[in-house]
Image: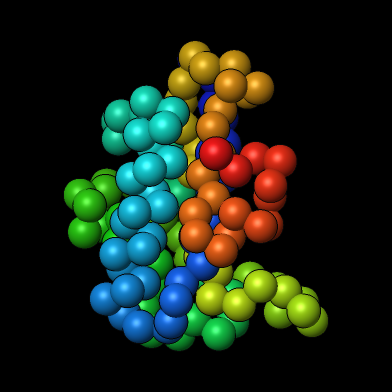
């Protein structure tokens, strides 16, 4: 069994707590589903948020999905001039036999523009 990283991002319409939690849950759920990852295979999930997101910690969405026993961490994304606003990013470390080249990274809404080469 190998350790793989699954990346993804979603752009929020607004910095609103309920919208953030729903959007983050959508991103994480779709990323795990696309890669057929059971929650038991999750090692950890790192969340980042652009500095303009202050309404809630994105990791709370994972806890509300039942991932309370998975190590979760939040951080603020670098504040680069001209970068896309209101973006939540994830990097989930998982145990899987899927070769790296077949891992599907999930980019939703406006965040698709971040990685057109990876977006599904």
Q: Which residue is depicted at the point 65% across and 40% down?
A: 118
The answer to whether residue 103 of the structure is visible from this angle is yes
Is 113 situated above or below 66?
below
Which residue is pictured at 61% across the width and 77% down the height?
Answer: 85
Q: Residue furthest right?
A: 81
Q: Residue at x 63, y 23 (%)?
A: 100
Q: Is residue 94 left or right of residue 19?
A: right
On screen, residue 93 above or below 45: above
Residue 6, image x, y percentages: 54, 39
Rendered image coloring scheme: rainbow
Is residue 71 at all visible to an observer of this figure?
no
Q: Position of residue 16 (x, y in %)?
A: 35, 83
Looking at the picture, how far across and down is residue 36, in whole percent? 37, 26
Query: Is 16 situated above or below 109?
Result: below
Which is more toward the observer, 91 or 12? 12
The C terminus is located in which quarter?
Answer: top right
């Amino acid at each position: 069994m190998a350790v793989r990283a699954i990346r993804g991002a979603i752009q929020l319409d607004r910095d609103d707590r309920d919208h953030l939690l729903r959007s983050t849950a959508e991103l994480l759920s779709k990323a795990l589903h696309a890669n057929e990852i059971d929650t038991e295979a999750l090692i950890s999930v790192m969340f980042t948020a652009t500095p303009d997101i202050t309404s809630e910690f994105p990791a709370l969405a994972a806890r509300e999905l039942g991932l309370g026993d998975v190590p979760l961490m939040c951080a603020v994304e670098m504040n680069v001039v001209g970068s896309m606003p209101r973006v939540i990013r994830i990097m989930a470390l998982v145990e899987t036999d899927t070769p790296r080249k077949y891992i599907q990274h999930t980019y939703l809404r406006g965040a698709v523009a971040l990685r057109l080469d990876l977006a599904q």
